Amino acid sequence: MSQYFLGENLIFIISQPRSGSTLLQRVLAGHPEIQTSAETWMMLHPVYALKDSGIDTEYNAKFSRQGMLEFLTHYTDGEEVHLDAIREWARIIYGNAIAKGGKTYFLDKTPRYFFIIPELYRLFPKAKFIFLIRNPMAVLASELSTYVNGDWKVLGIFRPDLIHAPQYLLDGIQLLGDSAVVIRYEDFVRTPEKSITALCNQLGITYHESMLNYDKTPKPIGSMNDPVGIDQHTRPSAASVDKWRNMSSDPQARHFAISYLDVLGHRVIEALGYSYDEIRDGLEAGKHDTHRGADIFPWDIAIRPQNDWNFREWLTAERFFAIKRKGKIKGRLSALKQGLLHAYRLVKQQLRTRQGIDN
């Protein structure tokens, strides 16, 4: 094992976004030994330097990776040297934050670390990894009411958080085994004292009752924080646990939710600790309304980034929102006009590309 920093004073919270991670972070930040900040995201880039997918840079990440691997293979003791360099880099940055705050531990709450759980565990085997699990339907409902807010075209930005994160979390829990610290959001907010006491025991720190009064704890500085929710209460509250059920009475939200449930499937939902059948029954409870398909924005388009849409999907979205804005007749005419312009631009772009190849 490496002689370098192995994360002895690090705590990671890994979850789907909108899982209550900001709330859990704020509660733990009330501990006198824990320093934290807004989401740092800082471990992603150094880890991705040697990944063969998932990263796109103007300097060409593929060539960079190839050059680094060849250098490490032929002129150093191998890839472990690069990992030790990352460890030392992390030790300096995290250590500086800990020292500046006069604390003992640093808590890094960056949900998209779900992409790099195996790498983080390899780098920092002595760190504490908290896996915060929440009903994925509640996560979706929160995404829809905060970041999406009726603009269905932007839902695709959150595809990794919704589609990939649940399985990555399950894989991470399995990988870490007994070292994984698992806490379920619903248990946390319903019985906060019991849950946080148990969590502190697993982290090897002393529970303080004052931690639950998180309104007394300063907010982490930075923009990467929960824009809503956290300031609605002063202690953990179970008020939002069943709000996902409200999607059953909204045809559009229900369509998204049932489609999302189908994508995750029975195995993932049950492995996360929830009842697939109960969730489905809850979502279908309001299915008595009669909305035509034209009034519903399709899930299979919404959940993908706009750059991945083909022309037909783009036109479907354009028509949907034009009708919402202008009514059926004017909306269809507007969408047709925009579709022709879009098609013209695509053809023009293809001709330019072809001319460039010919030249």
Image: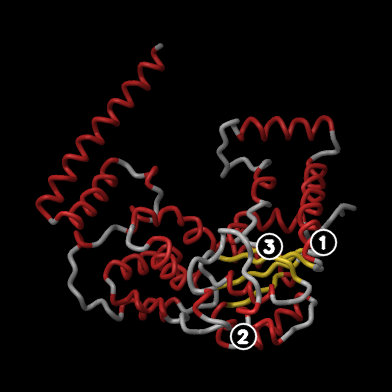
The residue located at (49%, 74%) in the rendering is 229
Reading the image, the residue beneath label 3 is 108
* Element class at badge 2: helix
Q: Quadrant of residue 101?
A: bottom right
Left or right: 290 in relation to 347: left
Are there few (<14), some (14-19), or many (20+) residues within 10 Å of tag 2?
many
Q: Amino acid at mark 1?
A: Ala
Q: Considering only vertical position in the picture, is 8 above or below 269?
A: above
Are there few (<14), some (14-19), or many (20+) residues within 10 Å of tag 1?
few
The quadrant of the rendering that contains the C terminus is top left
Q: Amino acid at mark 2?
A: Pro
Color encoding of the figure? secondary structure
In the image, 332 versus 223, the foreground residue is 223
Q: Are marks 2 and 3 in contact (CB under 8 Å)?
A: no
The residue located at (43%, 65%) in the rendering is 143
Q: Are marks 3 and 1 in contact (CB under 8 Å)?
A: no
Q: Considering only vertical position in the picture, is 339 above or below 208?
A: above
- In three-dimensional space, the C-alpha distance between marks 2 and 3, rounded to whole angstroms, equals 21 Å
Between discs 2 and 1, the one toward the N terminus? 1
Q: Amino acid at mark 3?
A: Asp
Left or right: 99 in relation to 334: right
- Horizontal and vertical percent for residue 52? 62, 40
Between discs 3 and 1, the one toward the N terminus? 1
Q: Which residue is outermost to the right? A: 3
Reading the image, the residue beneath label 2 is 192
Reading the image, the residue beneath label 1 is 99
* Element class at badge 1: helix
In the image, 15 versus 327, the foreground residue is 327
